[in-house]
Structure formats: structure tokens, C-alpha cells
């Protein structure tokens, strides 16, 4: 087969794979130190990774307050997450690229109250900070947390 013809056959296949390849290299992927928007304190270490074409986040470590039980479970959650350990839990899912350094269309679970909110995220500070907004209906009705990239 002629080289030009082989290339012509491969181009559509490469074009179909390109979006997934770009997403796999997403600058949002990695470990993040979450900061509580109400107290300003560090709350957890989470990992954001590509799973089945979408970005998902799971909780790796929780910084417990003195009044909190060790090995917390999601008592307020419904369904399959009810009374499941929070550490290791997928709490963020469905994020897809939405412009440069922005992701939208996702959902986020607040393990404290068991509620699931719409989610969107954007990078700041040259990729060292992540602004994650959880909201109901419109982004105007929500809360934003700014997480710091974990360097270790």
C-alpha cells in the first residue's frame, strides 16, 4: 500500500483518538490539597484522574478535626455510597473540557451532607490552584473552593 494511502486511512483513526489523548494529558489531573471554603483550613488530599473519558476525583486522605471520628463513613449519603468509607470514595465525576483550563458538566458529592451538586473547575495561578465550584442549577447559586496542587 502506498504511504500516502496508508496515511489517509490512519488520519481518521488518529483524529478520533486525539480528544482522549489530550484529556489524558489534562493539566487538572494529579493530587490536590483541598481547602475548606468556610474555615480556610486544609481538609483533604484528593486525586483527579481520567476514567472512561471523564475526569473523576477520589479522596486519598482526610485531615480530621479533633471532634471527628477516625475512618469516617458517608452517613448522610444515599444509595451505594451510604455508610461507605470516605477515604477512597469517588466524590467528583463527569468533568469534561470546557475551554482553556476549564472543565464543566460534572457532579460533586459533599460527604458531610450527602448532597450531590453540579460542578465546574478552572485552573489558576499557573496551574498551581484549582477553583472548583459546586452549585444547584446555575453557577450563581453555589460555593467555590480553591485547592492547592500537591507537590509531593
Image: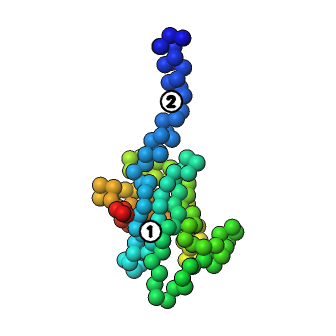
Q: How crowded is mark 2: few (under 14 residues within 10 Å), some or many (20 or more)?
A: few
Label 2, label 1: how far apart the Cα atoms are:
35 Å
Q: Is mark 1 on a helix, strand or loop?
A: strand
* Residue occupying image coordinates x 44% and y 54%: 29
- Name the residue nearer the viewer: 119 or 29: 29
Relative to residue 27, is residue 62 depicted above or below? Answer: below
Can residue 141 be seen in this snapshot?
no
Seen as rendered, the residue at the extreme top is 2
- Name the residue nearer the viewer: 95 or 82: 82
Q: Residue 14 carries which label?
A: 2
Seen as rendered, the residue at the extreme left is 125
**Residue that mark 1 sits on:** 45
Q: In this view, does 41 lie to the left or right of 53?
A: left
Badges 2 and 1: C-beta atoms under 8 Å apart? no
Quadrant for residue 84, please give it.
Answer: bottom right
- Quick one: label 2 or label 1, which is nearer the N terminus? 2
Seen as rendered, the residue at the extreme front is 152
Task: Give the percent coordinates (x, y) of residue 77.
Answer: 64, 73
Amino acid at each position: 500500500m502506498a504511504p500516502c494511502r496508508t496515511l489517509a486511512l490512519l488520519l481518521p483513526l488518529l483524529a478520533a483518538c486525539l480528544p482522549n489523548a489530550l484529556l489524558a494529558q489534562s493539566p487538572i489531573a494529579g493530587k490536590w490539597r483541598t481547602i475548606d471554603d468556610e474555615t480556610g483550613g486544609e481538609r483533604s488530599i484528593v486525586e483527579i484522574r481520567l476514567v472512561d473519558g471523564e475526569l473523576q476525583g477520589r479522596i486519598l486522605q482526610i485531615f480530621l478535626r479533633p471532634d471527628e471520628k477516625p475512618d469516617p463513613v458517608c452517613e448522610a449519603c444515599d444509595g451505594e455510597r451510604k455508610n461507605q468509607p470516605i477515604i477512597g470514595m469517588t466524590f467528583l465525576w463527569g468533568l469534561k473540557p470546557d475551554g482553556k483550563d476549564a472543565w464543566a458538566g460534572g457532579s460533586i458529592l459533599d460527604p458531610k451532607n450527602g448532597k450531590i451538586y453540579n460542578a465546574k473547575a478552572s485552573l489558576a495561578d499557573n496551574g498551581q490552584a484549582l477553583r472548583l465550584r459546586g452549585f444547584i442549577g446555575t453557577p450563581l447559586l453555589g460555593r467555590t473552593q480553591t485547592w492547592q496542587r500537591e507537590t509531593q
